[in-house]
Amino acid sequence: MANSYDLIVIGAGPGGLAAGIYASRSKLNTLVIEKGVVGGQAATTEEMENYPGFYLGVTGPQLTGHMHKHAEHFGCNFLKDEVVDLDLTGYEKVVVTKNGRYTAKAVVIATGAEPRFLGVKGEKELKGKGVSYCATCDADFYEDLDVVVLGNGDAAIEEAIYLTRFAAKVTIIVIHDEGVMDATKVIQERAYKNDKIEFIWNSTLEEIKGDGIVENVAIKNIKTGKVTDLETNGVFIFVGTVPRTELIKGKVELDQRGYIPANELMETTVDGVYAVGDVRTKYLRQVVTAAADGAIAAVAAEKYMQEEENFKSEVLDKAKAIAVMFWSPFHQGSLEMVPLVEKFASRHSEKLDMVKIDTYRNQRIARRYDVKEMPSVLLFKGGEVVGRVTGDLTSEKLEKLATLA
């Protein structure tokens, strides 16, 4: 089917692009869906000095453009469209866009995050009219003008430094005491050395004012409560991000902030669904970590498909009863029980076959069938579990399974 794929990646930021590269290189029929610009937020970053191998610097558009071409080189398909619904239940996942319906055996969520709104008076009304959340997008509008930056993390200070290439003066409003910022030391030092940057400490924005465009801001000192007005031509707000997970609420587990928890394989709480990049719960949100996430997810998805297809063909689709032994080479008790189960299967070979699953390598199927103790033997018939024995296996316990075959 033209709209049927092995893997669908939702989002074409660095995480999604890396997933596309690794998946298509592994000969998976892969589709990357992106409603905006390929490259995500990284494509709006003018300078990138910390991506390994590019010590002289590279622009975001250049780096993500190379990733895009890299994925296409291996046969990855790209679609400019917006995903409006998902059905992630079952082995075949359904992705519905504004213009079509697509299916896949696995899905990678790489939808990223977007700037958090401050929520102050005037922000909404003047958004795009002097209020911005992206310096690299809008800095050139403020050549030789004065701007205000709210925020003191790495992104805020880096964007403020970038603004000084255009603006006459950049005033950074910091909620902390003088000399205290959340940005890393090296970034702080660059800001302190920049003659165009000034700081207002212990303060936050109270209101953004202007008649059609930003004209001034009200700044409140959080210690004294005093509010003062400052004339400015623009306001850049950098107070964190919000994950783009509206589409998947109720479909996969989210944390309290709305991010997707994922394990070291990028697996979510739904089999065959992976989360990469800024949309997932993680310590460091950078291009390099998003790319690593994407690579891991693609490899994990490929292994998932192989395991699922093997389990389906060897167990679920068989007309004959199948005794599935869950064991681990690192569990001495299950190692000792393997010969016993093999002899049992051999005695009843006319009516059942045996399949062994190493739970060290495949915990997912064990979880799906609520296997909590090793060794365990589950009897499948017609794709359903009709009996099980766990723990200290004996010939007597196994013979009871044979009566159900």
Image (cartoon, grey):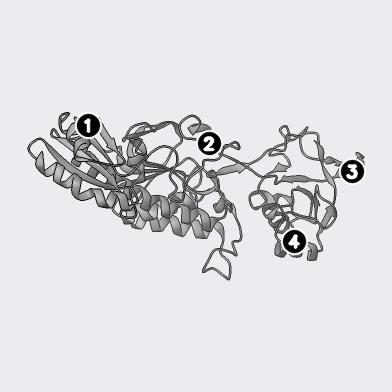
Q: CA distance from mark 3 to mark 4?
A: 23 Å
Secondary element under disc 1, as helix, strand or loop, is loop
Q: Residue furthest left?
A: 350
Q: Nearer the viewer, mark 3 or mark 4?
A: 3
Type of residue at label 2? Leu
Q: Position of residue 325 (x, y in %)?
A: 25, 43
Q: CA distance from mark 3 to mark 1?
A: 67 Å
Residue at x-position 85% and y-position 55%: 178
Q: Position of residue 234 (x, y in %)?
A: 76, 45
Residue at x-position 41% and y-position 57%: 69
Residue tagged 1: 383
Which disc, if any, is residue 254? 2
Residue tagged 4: 188
Tally of marks:
4
Type of residue at label 4? Gln
Which disc, if any, is residue 18? none
Secondary element under disc 3, as helix, strand or loop, is loop
